[in-house]
């Protein structure tokens, strides 16, 4: 097992080295053009204003949507998992199932456009807040399914044991089942954060300035779409790689004794 791991590291390092060497050679050959293109597109006042603002909004929408999705998804999952025959609980289950079906069955761009231009047609505030709401609702539908899978991986005896000890359904879920469910679906939740970073690139459809919209505005100034969009792709790739690495470190630290 250790030899295989070392071989994988060697192969990975070799591939990374080959890619870096290729990039260095290409940069050296086209150095003058790269310097000119970079200074033309990014060494100006528009770039220094748009890019930090767009990056901040991208992270803001992602964090707000994930937190909202985590809370909403947990509530929806608990309602769907309830065995109560109370009429209000049954109504809530049907609403929760329709909510999940609706947001998982339609594209996020369509949801964003409908929420902003139809539901919030009279809204005059910042569109970024509508984007947070839309992506939070969308994330909640997926998170509820992740948690449902996590609960399914918890032995049924855990719930039965809690109820037999006299704990209510709510306390049994919150104290016994959900902590184990979160552990089981933690990789899926991390993947949801990474997905949100990429999915928020469509908030420009409603006029919000995110990272993608910021790059688009820069491209319309210089008409150098190739350079600007290549840099945009590289920035997203770097953000996702760093975030994935940090989340993997967090996972190992939190569950190292699990």
Image (cartoon, helix red, strand yellow):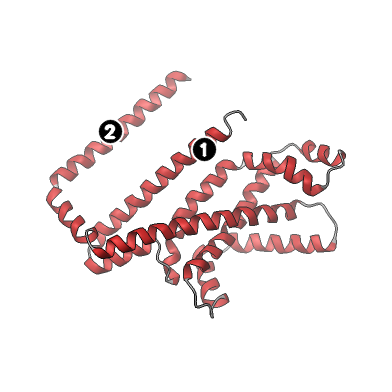
Mark 1 surroundings within 10 Å by alpha-carbon count, few (fewer than 14), some (14 through 19), many (20 or more): few
Residue 224 in the figure: left or right of residue 70: left
Q: Residue at x 43, y 24 (%)?
A: 5
Which sits earlier in the primary sequence, circle 1 or circle 2?
A: 2
Specify the label residue 17 is tagged with.
Answer: 2
Residue at 57%, 54% (x, y): give it. 67
Using the rendered view, name the quadrant where residue 215 is placed: bottom left
Q: Kindly indicate the quadrant of the structure image that contains residue 88.
A: bottom right
Judge the density around disc 2: few (<14), some (14-19), many (≥20) Cα neighbours within 10 Å: few
The answer to whether residue 8 is above or below residue 217 is above
Tell me the distance, in whole angstroms, between the alpha carbons under discs 1 and 2: 27 Å
In the image, what residue occupies the spot 74% across and 62% down?
94
Q: Nearer the viewer, mark 1 or mark 2?
A: 1
- With 150 as the anchor, is 84 left or right in this view? right
Whether residue 131 sits left or right of residue 41 in the image: it is right
What residue is drawn where x is 55% and y is 54%? Answer: 66
Q: Position of residue 153 (x, y in %)?
A: 68, 39
| Position of the C terminus by quadrant | top right
Whether residue 211 is visible here, answered yes or no, is no
Residue 13 at x, y percent in the picture: 33, 30
Q: Are marks 1 and 2 in contact (CB under 8 Å)?
A: no
Q: Which residue is mark 1?
A: 250
Q: Secondary structure at mark 1?
A: helix
Q: Residue furthest bottom?
A: 122
Residue 51, placed above or below residue 194: below
Residue 49 position, x and y percent, is: 31, 63
């Amino acid at each position: 097992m250790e030899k295989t791991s070392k071989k994988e590291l060697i192969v990975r390092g070799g591939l990374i080295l080959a890619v870096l060497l290729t990039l260095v050679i290409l940069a050296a050959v086209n150095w003058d053009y790269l310097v000119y293109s970079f200074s033309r597109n990014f060494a100006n006042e528009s770039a220094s204003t748009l890019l930090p603002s767009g990056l901040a909004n991208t992270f803001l929408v992602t964090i707000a949507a994930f937190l909202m999705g985590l809370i909403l998804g947990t509530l929806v999952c608990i309602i769907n998992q309830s065995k109560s025959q109370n009429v209000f609980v049954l109504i809530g289950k049907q609403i929760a199932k329709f909510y999940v079906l609706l947001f998982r069955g339609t594209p996020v761009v369509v949801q964003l456009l409908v929420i902003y231009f139809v539901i919030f047609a009279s809204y005059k505030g910042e569109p970024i807040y509508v984007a947070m709401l839309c992506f939070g609702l969308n994330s909640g539908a997926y998170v509820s399914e992740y948690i449902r899978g996590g609960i399914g991986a918890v032995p049924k005896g855990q719930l039965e044991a809690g109820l037999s000890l006299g704990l209510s359904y709510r306390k049994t879920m919150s104290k016994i089942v959900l902590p184990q469910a979160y552990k089981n679906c933690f990789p899926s939740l991390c993947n949801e954060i990474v997905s949100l970073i990429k999915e928020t690139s469509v908030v420009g459809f409603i006029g919000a300035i995110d990272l993608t919209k910021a790059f688009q505005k820069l491209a319309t100034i210089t008409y150098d779409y190739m350079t600007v969009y290549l840099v945009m792709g590289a920035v997203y790739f770097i953000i996702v790689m760093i975030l994935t690495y940090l989340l993997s470190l967090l996972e190992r630290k939190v569950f190292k004794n699990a």
